[in-house]
Image (spheres, helix red, strand yellow):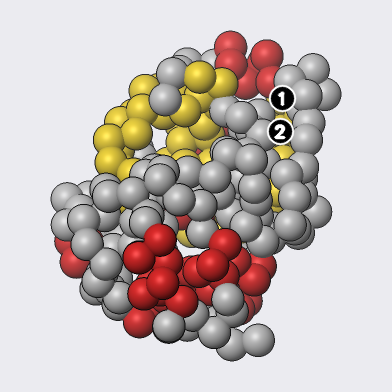
Amino acid sequence: MDIPEPNPAHALLPELDVPSKPYGRRAFLGLATLGSLGILIGNREAAVTKATVGKLAKYDPTGLAQELPLNDTRWTIFTVTDGYPSRSHAKYRLAVTGLVDRPLDLSYAELRSRKATHMTKDFQCVTGWRVERVPWVGVLLSDLLHEAGVKPSAKALRLKSFDGEYTESLTMQQAMRPDMLVAYQLEGRDLTREHGGPVRLYAAPMYGYKSIKWLESIEVVDSATSGYWEQRGYDIDAWVGKSNGRDDAAT
């Protein structure tokens, strides 16, 4: 199935909060189609109304617009498996393996015992919606890589989700940035299952599909490989940049 190319200049869709209903492959593709068409439907912080849904439906080949939840204004939850995987804090493990001197196998408690980094930045989805000034807490990805001891031959990371499907990648230069966070808290609370908990990546300067949820493993490798959505047509370097009003473009 063809997927529209991400368009950083498209108009913003409303931000939606759907804590009880996951959007799977069909939903993501539908919203990506709408976003790439650049439909202007008013203030991005306005609630979705029946009139708005009607306008969207005219441009939506999937029929998804009729399923959009009304009267909420923040997060849209996506999953590629049509469900939310679950792992308790007690059973959670994060592995850092591959081209490292000291492989890590961290429990949730061990991860949280590392130096915490607080970060407040926007979350921007490739489909157009944005949540501004989101408070995150976690451990810098670079701190974990330094702890593991990255070998000179290392060039990239391969990241996997415990949903069994989703993968992502970063170059080593990207991974070492000070705005790449292995996050366990969002907006003052432990990450919920819907938001990718217990632990997810937050790649602040990149579109949301790079911020892999339900993070299970970080493998240090010698070359970057395409992740789940890159294999379906999205850019492997997913910088948001100034075209979306962001001040943290790739440097």
How many marks on residues?
2
Residue 231 visible within the image: yes
Q: What's the distance in space between the residues labelled 1 and 2, CA to CA?
A: 5 Å
The residue under label 1 is 106
Question: Compared to 79, does 143 lie above or below?
Answer: above
The residue positioned 42% from the left and 25% from the top of the image is 187
The residue positioned 61% from the left and 45% from the top of the image is 213
Residue 205 visible within the image: no
Question: Compared to 3, does 205 lie above or below?
Answer: above
Identify the secondary structure beneath mark 2.
strand
Question: Compared to 141, does 222 lie above or below?
Answer: below
Measuring from the top left, give residue 97's x and y in whole percent.
72, 43
246 or 153: nearer the eye?
A: 246
Task: Indicate the amino acid at tag 1.
Answer: Leu
Measuring from the top left, give residue 225's x and y in whole percent.
61, 69
The residue under label 2 is 94
1 or 2: tag closer to the N-terminus: 2
Q: Are marks 1 and 2 in contact (CB under 8 Å)?
A: yes
Q: Residue furthest front?
A: 50
The residue positioned 59% from the left and 66% from the top of the image is 27
Quarter of the picture holding the C terminus: bottom left
Measuring from the top left, give residue 142's x and y in whole percent.
47, 36
155 or 183: nearer the eye?
A: 183
Task: Indicate the amino acid at tag 2.
Answer: Leu
Q: Which mark is residue 237?
A: none
The residue positioned 80% from the left and 54% from the top of the image is 164
Measuring from the top left, give residue 81's x and y in whole percent.
75, 58
Quarter of the picture holding the N terminus: bottom right
Identify the secondary structure beneath mark 1.
strand
Binning the other alpha carbons within 10 Å of mark 2 as few (below 14), some (14 to 19) or many (20 upward) gives: some
In the figure, is residue 66 to the left or right of 148?
left
Binning the other alpha carbons within 10 Å of mark 1 as few (below 14), some (14 to 19) or many (20 upward) gives: some
